[in-house]
């Protein structure tokens, strides 16, 4: 045991729980009583164990030491908890000391894609595209703030009144955003976007109803045909997942540079260089932006550049790369329609300080991008590709587009599922002949014979 010198385990236990009020709480078998027991055990363990020595141990061994101490304390006081409650309390004690407290069980649940802490006593999760409230909670705002501090300190960041919001990343790659008062009026708030451990394949997207077989084959063809692809959609619509799946069709003999704010892409090719932005340090210096990484990637002899998401000035350099020989590149953008996606890129030119006529900006966009894939998360939680359009050219000051596939919605069934079918529009893409010369098989019937799921 890593006990502190001159510290009696029994004495600490007695000091913590000897008064009648605490004893009564120990006898209560409800959730509130369990929380009180856990708090008292935490106090005892903090007084009993040398936590600085625990930090030198592998996590599994440290958790064993904490579990043994907690079990002894429960045994000595003869707490009338059943075996299941006793086990849960001991596990939660380990989570509090070594992990992220009440968030740990949620992080272990692979069915959860997002964890949303609105307040210390209100935690939501997203499963299969739908939000649901949980029974998990923090003791108070101070408890939640302590966990947030633990997260951000691990990546060399800080959060306080002078810097009240921060982005960070957990060990498993999950993205974290935290915001505290005075910006968060009702107390600290925490959002965790889970990192997908399992890399989805196209067959799984087909099973989920994200698209149909013709659309899947089309996406494979345009990646192999080295078209520049923009994947558009709202928050949580499946953009990164779709980008991951599409990137799987890049040939293994090509050199790929990936650029992300928070590393989520899981490319399986052998020749991949992964780049990630760097936020400023505590003094506000040392930040490396996506734009700087895109510019640097052009000096790294890439065959393709994959940007996780364009949000600002990096879009200009990304399009410049697409226009100067780095065809077959891909990125995502937050937008609700393909037309909105192009409009957002126009705004990014302004963010980059480009003072040029809008017609010239649009000409740059039209010549760089070939296909926009639009995604949407439906009310039933399912992600669907709602439209695939080809970027044609310019007519006057307007970028022209041709829709090739679409999801035609028909309604909602009795179980609340969105119904509809995937259809080809009858428009044939302009690159069909070029694909034929490249040996890429893309049947004309996909486009000339409208049909759906």
Image (spheres, rainbow, N blue to C red):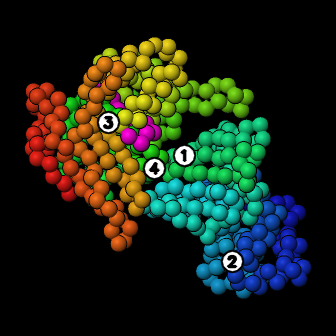
Q: Which residue is mark 4?
A: 236
* Left or right of 265 on screen, residue 408: left
Q: Which residue is mark 1?
A: 175
Q: CA separation, marks 1 and 2? A: 30 Å
Helix, strand or loop at mark 3:
strand
**Mark 4 / mark 2, whichever is N-terminal:** 2
Q: Residues within 10 Å of mark 2 (few under 14, many from 20)?
A: few
- Of labels 4 and 3, the one closer to you: 3
- Of labels 2 and 3, the one closer to you: 3
Image quarter of the C terminus: bottom left
Q: Residues within 10 Å of mark 3 (few under 14, many from 20)?
A: many
Q: Is residue 40 magenta?
A: no
**Mark 1 / mark 4, whichever is N-terminal:** 1
Q: Residues within 10 Å of mark 1 (few under 14, many from 20)?
A: many
Helix, strand or loop at mark 4:
loop
Q: Are marks 4 and 3 in contact (CB under 8 Å)?
A: no
**Residue 421 placement (x, y as % from top left):** 24, 56
Q: Which residue is mark 3?
A: 372
**Mark 1 / mark 3, whichever is N-terminal:** 1
Q: Are marks 1 and 3 in contact (CB under 8 Å)?
A: no
* Left or right of 1 on screen, residue 417: left
Q: Which residue is mark 2?
A: 31
User: From which residue to which does the magenta span run?
Assistant: 327-337
């Amino acid at each position: 045991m890593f006990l502190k010198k001159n510290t009696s385990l029994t004495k600490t236990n007695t000091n913590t729980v000897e008064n009648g009020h605490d004893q009564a709480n120990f006898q209560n078998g409800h959730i509130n009583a369990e929380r009180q027991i856990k708090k008292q055990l935490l106090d005892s363990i903090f007084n009993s164990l040398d936590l600085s020595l625990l930090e030198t141990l592998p996590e599994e061994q440290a958790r064993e030491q904490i579990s043994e101490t907690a079990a002894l304390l429960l045994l000595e006081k003869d707490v009338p908890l059943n075996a299941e409650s006793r086990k849960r309390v001991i596990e939660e004690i380990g989570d509090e000391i070594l992990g992220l407290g009440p968030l740990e069980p949620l992080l272990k649940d692979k069915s959860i894609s997002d964890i949303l802490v609105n307040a210390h006593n209100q935690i939501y999760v997203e499963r299969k595209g739908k939000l649901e409230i949980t029974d998990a909670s923090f003791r108070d705002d101070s408890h939640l703030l302590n966990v947030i501090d633990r997260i951000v300190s691990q990546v060399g960041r800080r959060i306080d009144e002078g810097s009240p919001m921060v982005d960070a990343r957990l060990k498993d790659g999950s993205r974290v955003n935290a915001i505290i008062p005075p910006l968060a009026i009702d107390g600290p708030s925490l959002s965790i976007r889970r990192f997908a451990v399992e890399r989805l394949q196209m067959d799984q997207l087909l099973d989920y109803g994200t698209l149909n077989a013709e659309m899947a084959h089309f996406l494979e063809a345009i990646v192999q045909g080295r078209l520049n692809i923009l994947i558009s959609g709202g928050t949580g619509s499946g953009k990164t997942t779709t980008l991951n799946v599409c990137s799987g069709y890049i040939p293994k003999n090509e050199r790929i540079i990936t650029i992300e704010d928070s590393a989520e892409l899981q490319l399986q090719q052998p020749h991949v260089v992964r780049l990630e932005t760097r936020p400023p340090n505590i003094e506000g210096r040392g930040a490396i932006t996506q734009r700087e990484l895109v510019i640097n990637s052009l000096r790294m002899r890439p065959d393709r550049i994959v940007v996780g998401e364009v949000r600002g000035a990096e879009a200009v350099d990304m399009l410049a790369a697409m226009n100067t020989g780095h065809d077959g590149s891909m990125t995502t953008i937050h937008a609700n329609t393909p037309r909105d996606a192009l409009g957002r890129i126009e705004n990014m030119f302004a963010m980059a300080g480009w003072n040029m006529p809008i017609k010239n900006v649009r000409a740059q966009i039209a010549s760089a991008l070939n296909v926009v894939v639009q995604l949407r998360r439906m009310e039933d939680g399912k992600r669907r590709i709602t439209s695939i359009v080809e970027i044609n050219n310019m007519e006057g000051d307007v970028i022209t587009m041709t829709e090739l596939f679409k999801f035609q919605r028909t309604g909602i069934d009795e179980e609340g599922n969105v119904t509809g079918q995937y259809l080809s529009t009858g428009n044939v893409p302009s690159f069909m002949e070029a694909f034929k010369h490249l040996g890429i098989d893309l049947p004309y019937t996909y486009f000339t014979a409208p049909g759906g799921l």
